[in-house]
Amino acid sequence: MKQELTITVPKDWSAVTLNQYLELRKDMLSYEGDEEALTACLFHHLCKFPLEYLQQLDLDTYISIKREILDFYNKVDYPLKKFIQIDGVKYGFEPNLSQMAYGAYVDISKYETLEIDTKWAEIMSILYRPVVRESGALYDIKPYNGDIDGDKFMKVGMDVHFGSLFFLSSLLKDLLNDTQKSLMGELMETDLPLKLKQILAKNGNLTHQLSNYHKEILQK
């Protein structure tokens, strides 16, 4: 008796949570170089497909699903999302980094790098806080009080996480490369604490590196 299985293939990274991504990344790094195992990781983590049934798929279905996954897999350069919803609450990205609370700078500076790893959710918890007031395009978020709750961001889609990461990386790149700084650029470079600038500097090529990570690990 044949058993029917429904396979849901994500169309983009918005359908993949940070928790899923971290588990996928861990397994893919473990099986790097083994194309068959890497593909199995994609099916298992992104489509939630039981591995025991993978070899039972007909070849056309297998190839079709793999192609659908790869269509979005290498696209990680998402724009920053100023607002997101978590459990019915509207969160806003820090509206003015140059005026961010000193305590938030200090807490972010505790992390050696800004990259999507097991600590990334905590950084997101600092940068995104509940919106308390909106007026046209302007908005205020809850004052930072040192309360870090990264767990809630583990279930947020990767389009949000990639967008935040690339925004921070691009910010540093613009600050370093803009020889004729705008007023905002001068303010940001002056006000950013040295430790935070050093952390960002370590990740100046993060956009390029992250894109290459996805391309190289499945280059075959």
Image (cartoon, grey):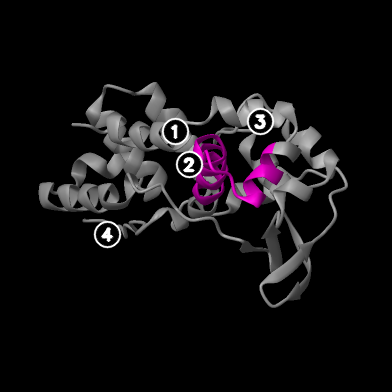
Secondary structure, magenta segment, majority class: helix
- The reply, left or right, for residue 208 in relation to residue 103 is left
Q: In this view, does 157 lie above or below 53?
A: below
Q: What residue type is labelled 2?
A: Tyr
Lower sequence index among marks 4 and 2: 4
Q: How far apart are marks 1 and 3 (CA)?
A: 27 Å
In the picture of the structure, the residue carrying the numbered disc 4 is 4
In the picture of the structure, the residue carrying the numbered disc 2 is 21
In the picture of the structure, the residue carrying the numbered disc 3 is 197
Secondary element under disc 3, as helix, strand or loop, is helix
Q: Which of marks 3 and 2 is in front?
A: 3
Q: Which of 7 and 114 is in front in this view?
A: 114
Q: Does the magenta stretch include residue 44?
A: no
Q: Which of marks 1 and 4 is in front?
A: 1
Q: Are marks 2 and 1 in contact (CB under 8 Å)?
A: yes
- The reply, left or right, for residue 12 in relation to residue 156 is left
User: Which residues fall within the magenta stretch?
Assistant: 162-189
Secondary element under disc 2, as helix, strand or loop, is helix
Q: x, y (%) of residue 138?
A: 71, 70
Q: How far apart are marks 1 and 4 (CA)?
A: 29 Å
Q: Which residue is drawn at 56% across and 48% down?
A: 164
In the picture of the structure, the residue carrying the numbered disc 1 is 25
Q: Are marks 1 and 3 in contact (CB under 8 Å)?
A: no
Q: Which residue is drawn at 72% across and 27% down?
A: 194
